[in-house]
Amino acid sequence: MFCRNKVKNEGSGNNLTVYSFDNIFLGTASKKYVKNASKEIKSIDSGVKIIDKFPDGVFLFSISQEKNKFFEEISRTPPIFLRHIQPIDIVLFFHTDHTDEMIVKTIDWLAAKEITGKKVAVQVRKMPFQREQSAFSYKKVIDKCVLEKYSAIPTVKNPDIIISLYICDSTGIDIDSGKAVELIPDSGGDSTYNRIAMIGMSTPRENLCERSGGIVRFAKEPGQLSRSGFKLLEAFEVFNFEHPEEKNALDLGASPGGWSKVLLEKGYAVTAIDRAPVDPELHKLGEIKIIQKDARLYSPKRNSFDILTNDMNRDPAHSANISVQAAMGLKQGAPLIMTIKLTGKNPEKIIQKTLKTLERAFVIKNVRQLYNNREEVTILGTKK
Ligand SMILES: C[S@@+](CC[C@H](N)C(=O)[O-])C[C@H]1O[C@@H](n2cnc3c(N)ncnc32)[C@H](O)[C@@H]1O
């Protein structure tokens, strides 16, 4: 049963009702893995109910336990496929011709939230295909208001608090009966609604990722060798990766050279191994040794590398065995960043099996389906 409270209007001159909740969240996963992400939440709280699905892997769910306990549990058992969550604290129905009314209500609601002096990131997402105002234009206005009215500091990176808005045109939350239904705001006659804003406040840690919707985009650069480089950049960001002081990297499955390029740009001397050619232009960026051969036939010198990266498109068991074999070239505690390709029907099983192999040589620190991962997950481990 949903918890529903109608919050009284606070005399701001408009008549929008603010509906408040304390057990509803939006989750985000890659479209293909929404089911796996739902399973993860249900394993944390068996009373979870999926109440709506939006395009792009966004889904609405209710929890059955207390909100802080849910946050605590989820940080104790970090999910792999669930990329991002945000609480839905209030729901507002508004018309796109009068977005100011929705903004005023949002700002009024923040009055009780003690955001003065805090670094606040306002993150707005819209359901795709809504043609009116851009998400950024909503954000710009709210940023200005939190600065002027509450002396909060609008921020993008490292915020203390995130205010999340998801703008859609229907929701599975039935405001009046508390049941999950497809509720589409009535925009006929005198009625004034054609959009719904679902709004919540949380910390970056609670959201599982500090980026809006867990979407980690990087700008395409001239001379970029492959999209693959984004996976490594995202892994560094999402895993809060601390680069080792000494910087010798072994990059397995390096062709055409996206990860090697990222490593060179981070100051590593790179040994790049692949059966296929790695772009020789990389020599211009720094110290790189390119070895064109099967990684199974490469024996690294003991304790010679400070990081191992492996993006080989082999079956996961095979690739994990090669990482274990290459581990002898790593210094103790050196990180491993590796992708596991999810080829079969049971990704969880593939992941568990691969981790078991890797655990022969590594302590597993994190496993995530990153925004830039396709049918794969990325692992962070350290050499035992
Ligand atoms: C997804 S691509 C790697 C992309 C690369 N990380 C980048 O950023 O450009 C996978 C690569 O793994 C290589 N590969 C697969 N099995 C291999 C093996 N046994 N030894 C060496 N390379 C292998 C393939 O040749 C392919 O180039």
Image (tube, grey):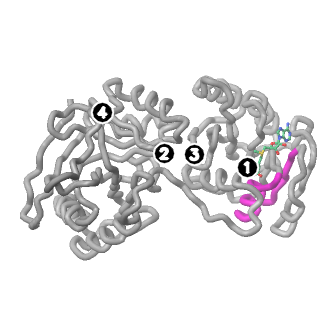
Q: Quadrant of residue 320?
A: top right
Q: Quadrant of the C terminus?
A: top right
- The kind of secondary structure element at disc 4 is loop
From the viewer's perspective, is 11 left or right of 210?
left
Badge 4: few (under 14), some or many (20 or more) residues near its Cα, within 10 Å? many
Q: CA gap, disc 4 to disc 2?
A: 22 Å
Give the mark nearest the N terminus, 2 or 1. Answer: 2
Which residue is drawn at the image coordinates 90% and 51% (left, top)? 277
Q: Which residue is mark 3?
A: 370
Q: Is residue 185 magenta?
A: no
**Residue 222 located left or right of residue 146:** right
Label 2 – label 3 distance at C-alpha: 14 Å
The kind of residue on which mark 4 rests is: Ile
The amino acid sitting under disc 3 is Leu
Q: Could you tell me which secondary element the residue under label 1 belongs to?
A: strand
> Is 69 displayed left or right of 178 in the figure?
right
**Mark 2 or 3, closer to the camera:** 2
Looking at the image, is 88 positioned above or below residue 48?
below
Q: Check if mark 2's residue and mark 1's residue have beta carbons within 8 Å.
A: no
Q: Please, what is the three-letter code of the amino acid marked with disc 2?
A: Asp
Residue 273 in magenta stretch: yes
Q: Which residue is denoted by mark 4 in the rendering?
A: 63
Q: Position of residue 5 (x, y in %)?
A: 13, 43
Q: Which residue is mark 2?
A: 56
Q: Which of the two discs, 3 and 1, labels the residue nearer the N terminus?
A: 1
- Closer to the camera: disc 3 or disc 1? 3
Q: Which residue is mark 1?
A: 307
Q: Is residue 230 left or right of residue 164?
A: right
Label 4 vs 2, first from the N-terminus: 2
Element carrying mark 2: loop
Magenta residues (range):
256-274
